[in-house]
Amino acid sequence: MTIYLPVAEVSVNAFLLLGLGGIVGILSGMFGVGGGFLLTPLLFFIGIPPAVAVGTQANQIVASSFSGVLAHFKRKTVDLKMGWVLLAGGLVGAAIGVKIFEMLTEIGQVDLMVQLCYVLFLGVIGALMFVESLNALLRSKRKDYVPRKRPEKGWVHTWPLKMKFRTSGLYISAIPVVLVGAFVGVLSAVMGVGGGFIMVPAMIYLLHMPTKVVVGTSLFQIIFVAAFTTIMHATTNYTVDAVLAVLLLIGGVIGAQIGSAIAVRLKAEQLRILLAGMVLIVCFKIALDLLLTPSELYSIASEIPH
Amino acid sequence: MTRLAALLILLVLPSVAGAERVVLGLSQDEVAITATFDGSSILIFGAVQRDAPPPSDQPLDVVIAVEGPKETVTVRKKARRFGIWVNSGAVEIDVAPSFYAVATTRPLDTALSQTEDLRYRISLDRAIQAIGAAEEASDAPSYLEALKRLRIADGRYMIREGAVALDEETLFRTSIRMPANLTVGNYTARIFLTRSGRVVDEYQTVISVHKVGLERWVFSLAQEQPLIYGGLSLIIAIAAGWAASAAFAMLRR
């Protein structure tokens, strides 16, 4: 069944969109990532104009993240206080990121910068997580293994402005939390994604939050970042396609529920190794696109003169 | 002076003779884009009206050109820089139709002379205007070729020589396939009658392509009330997220 998308101005198979939304929703619920880094390239691939794909996926991420975070709220695995502090940093970062994006557009080659950002961040984060979680998984398999406690006092624990984050069981300075939020905000504005795939590892490795709390808290923060992005795209570029968004989010919200149910059955290490593997696959695909000779050297961008 | 006179006679001749005129029919003069729109075929048919018997020595040709709203197009070309493929060159083409179809009874260069093509801008090369493109890149023609090749591939441009059926030099018909990714606006359909490559009559009509129903409502809201539209999109997203969560909670009980 094909359906015509009013803003994208193309007709696509409705079931294909439902399926894509579903797959990304499952990942969203499992890992606490918005899935934008996966969905956006997939939408390009099926012929949605890039600007509409970026604008619309932000809206779909709001839906799947909201569905996911409700499931996490029931399990009390959302650190609200941490979420708000991260968000405060995130909005500042996003505003800076929009400025950087404008500058890149003026220089030209913004597409290239976005792709290079993807390769760099996905590659580094994916590789680090993969190695770490693989080690953790191997260690936990040994019978004589006694879980080593994470160092209670890392470098971030000596900073001032300490706050109690009860759900995460942390008593740390608010400064690194805001910085992490701001850094992710910059990247998400430049790369056009929610930023969960950067936020999740940052929470685990920099802030030492428990993995189970990380997913819900990340989703909570992503809802607001993605909502902000949706409004920005709708008002400045007119590139949010409501019909496309509805089809994606019907699949997405159902997928998110399934994903969060899967997440509670998996060990934290398994969860991290799967996310790392997925991040690396996407990184590899984008790197290949940059390195291999494209089958079509030319591309067309058109506008109706006013 | 004699050349000017000859030219004047040439120009006036068809209308004086009034020999042959197009009487046109269209299967539809509007294309409504609905939610399930998946392209459309338009049947263009008509008859040739004449006062006197047709000249027997020169066969009649029918050339039909359908043109979509004009756009400004930027064609970019990738090249390898430091090992990776990046957009390295760009050529802006001032006027390129968003859709262009030419259908003829015989090959275009037989049915239409070069001069008449220049005058009426009928062939695809004439419909695309790339003034100043040569200054933007030394290999500007390759960008133009790429534009034509890519758009022929996705069904936006088509050259269908011999696709117009002509019976008894009087009745003609052809069908033009319009793809799903149509640009909305007014499309012009031009029908030319030619003899020995010279245009003896021209007829022009408009086919309106527009969105209807829900498609129209969503599109105009997005354009005219973007803040409300963005807000509505968010409300739908939040509601859908909540509904799925509630539904799964009920299922588990």
Image (cartoon, coloured by chain):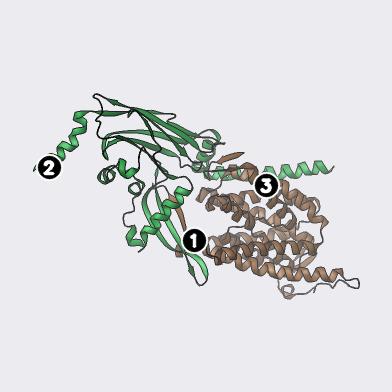
Chain colours: A brown, B green
Quadrant in the rendering for residue A35: bottom right
Q: Tell me where residue A126 appears, x and y as whole percent.
A: 68, 67
Amino acid under disc 1: Glu
| Residue nearer the viewer, B53 or B17 | B53
Alpha carbon of mark 3 to alpha carbon of mark 1: how far? Answer: 34 Å
- In this rendering, the label closer to the viewer, 1 or 2: 2
A211 or B151, nearer to the observer? B151
Residue under circle 1?
A102
- In primary-sequence order, the first of circles 3 and 1 is 3
Label 2: element kind: helix
Q: Is residue A40 above or below residue B161?
A: below
Query: In the rendered structure, the residue with mark 2 lies on which chain?
Result: B
Residue A83 percent location from the top left of the image: 71, 58
Between label 3 and label 1, give the one nearer the viewer.
3
Residues under labels 1 and 2: Cα distance? 59 Å
Residue designated by label 3 = A19
- In the rendered image, which quarter contains the C terminus of chain B? top right
**Real-space Cα separation, disc 2 to disc 3, in angstroms:** 69 Å
Quick one: SS at disc 3?
helix
Residue A245 figure quarter: top right
Q: Mark 1 lies on which chain?
A: A
> Residue A282: x percent and y percent?
64, 61
> Toward which corner of the image does residue A215 lie, by quadrant?
bottom right
The N terminus of chain B lies in quadrant: top left
The residue tagged with tag 1: helix, strand or loop? Answer: helix
Q: Are marks 2 and 3 in contact (CB under 8 Å)?
A: no
| Crowd band around label 3 with a 10 angstrom C-alpha radius: few (<14), some (14–19), many (20+) | some
The residue tagged 2 is B4
Residue at left offset 47%, top offset 39%: B178
What's the amino acid at mark 3?
Answer: Gly
Nearer mark to the viewer, of 2 and 3: 2
Residue B145 makes an appearance in the image: yes
